[in-house]
């Protein structure tokens, strides 16, 4: 599942393969961009903002080192991915019907699968797409105090929902949120105003996602072995790694949250959700 660390690595892979290169061909398979040909455009850089990827390009008509810069913006959603292939390398099998974008240079091909959003805007309009986001956990200028300030504006909101809201802090998804709440001993429905140490929670989020940004296997336990990478996420009915209590899964909003009822005692009964016996 793409979260901030996955998006960060994806943007970095695109940057390494394409920065400074001229596109030789493009195929954007969404209706509004289907007629746009990016051949001849120069890739300036690729960067991430929360769960968004911003690929900045200079049109061939722009003067060298100047002119208007355009941004190819994509959001991976729940299932999206960019893959970079060498020329002649076989693409992911049986997935061609999921392709939404293809970018080519003389040395590499980038293929975007199941992209949730894909649009092209002037770089100065990026704010319209990502300006609503809270502080980015993987930004070198990460601002924890601002993240806490934004969370506190929603004092009656369940902490699970507040952490998933990208307007408060950008980069966390369901995996990290479930794991963070377990590590801090917080029931998912604890109101933000009742969280005893929001700064500590935010600091832990930053440490976890930073630790995982450079490796393909995400772990919150420290183990990279299959089946041992999380404490509660994806482990419904399995014993808690701390106390042995079966892990529960609760549907809150439109997501399944995993939690241990012993290690994360609820201050009040779970509200606004139902225990789910189905898969996430």
Image (spheres, grey):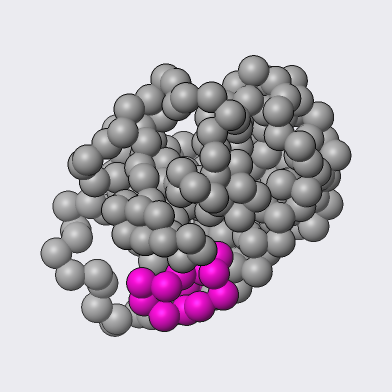
Question: Where residue 205 appears, x then y in whole percent?
Answer: 67, 52
Residue 229 seen:
yes
The answer to whether residue 221 is above or below residue 111 is below
Given residues 82 and 210, the one toward you in this image is: 210
Residue occupying the point 54% across, 50% down: 263
The answer to whether residue 141 is above or below residue 14 is above
The answer to whether residue 38 is above or below residue 190 is below
The answer to whether residue 200 is above or below residue 119 is below
Number of on-image labels:
0
Question: Where residue 255 appears, x then y in whole percent?
Answer: 38, 35
Residue 116 seen:
no
Given residues 231 and 79, the one toward you in this image is: 231
Given residues 131 and 219, the one toward you in this image is: 219
Quadrant in the picture for the N terminus: bottom left
Question: Where residue 120 appears, x then y in whole percent?
Answer: 51, 38
Magenta range is 216-229
**Which picture quadrant has residue 206?**
bottom right
Residue occupying the point 79% across, 57% down: 140
Residue closest to the far left: 94
Magenta span has 61? no
Residue occupying the point 55% across, 65% down: 220
């Amino acid at each position: 599942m793409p979260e901030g660390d996955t998006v960060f690595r994806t943007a970095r892979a695109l940057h390494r393969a394409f920065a400074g290169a001229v596109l030789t061909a493009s195929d954007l398979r969404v209706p509004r961009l289907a007629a746009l040909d990016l051949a001849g455009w120069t890739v300036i850089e690729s960067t991430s903002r929360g769960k968004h990827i911003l690929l900045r390009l200079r049109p061939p008509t722009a003067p060298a080192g100047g002119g208007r810069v355009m941004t190819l913006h994509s959001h991976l959603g729940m299932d999206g991915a960019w893959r970079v292939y060498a020329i002649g390398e076989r693409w992911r099998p049986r997935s061609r019907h999921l392709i939404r974008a293809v970018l080519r240079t003389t040395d590499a091909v980038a293929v975007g699968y199941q992209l949730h959003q894909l649009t092209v805007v002037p770089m100065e309009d990026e704010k319209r797409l990502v300006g609503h986001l809270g502080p980015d956990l993987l930004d070198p200028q990460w601002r924890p105090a601002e993240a806490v300030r934004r969370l506190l504006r929603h004092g009656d909101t369940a902490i699970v929902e507040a952490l998933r809201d990208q307007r408060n802090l950008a980069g966390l998804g369901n995996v990290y949120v479930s794991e963070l709440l377990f590590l801090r001993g917080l029931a998912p429905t604890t109101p933000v105003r009742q969280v005893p140490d929001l700064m500590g929670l935010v600091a832990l989020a930053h440490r976890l996602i930073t630790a995982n940004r450079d490796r393909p296997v995400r772990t919150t336990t420290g183990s990279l072995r299959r089946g041992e990478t999380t404490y509660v996420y994806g482990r419904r009915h399995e014993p808690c790694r701390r106390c042995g209590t079966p892990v529960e899964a609760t549907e809150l909003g439109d997501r399944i949250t995993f939690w241990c009822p012993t290690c994360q005692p609820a201050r009040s009964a779970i509200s606004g959700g139902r225990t789910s016996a189905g898969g996430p």
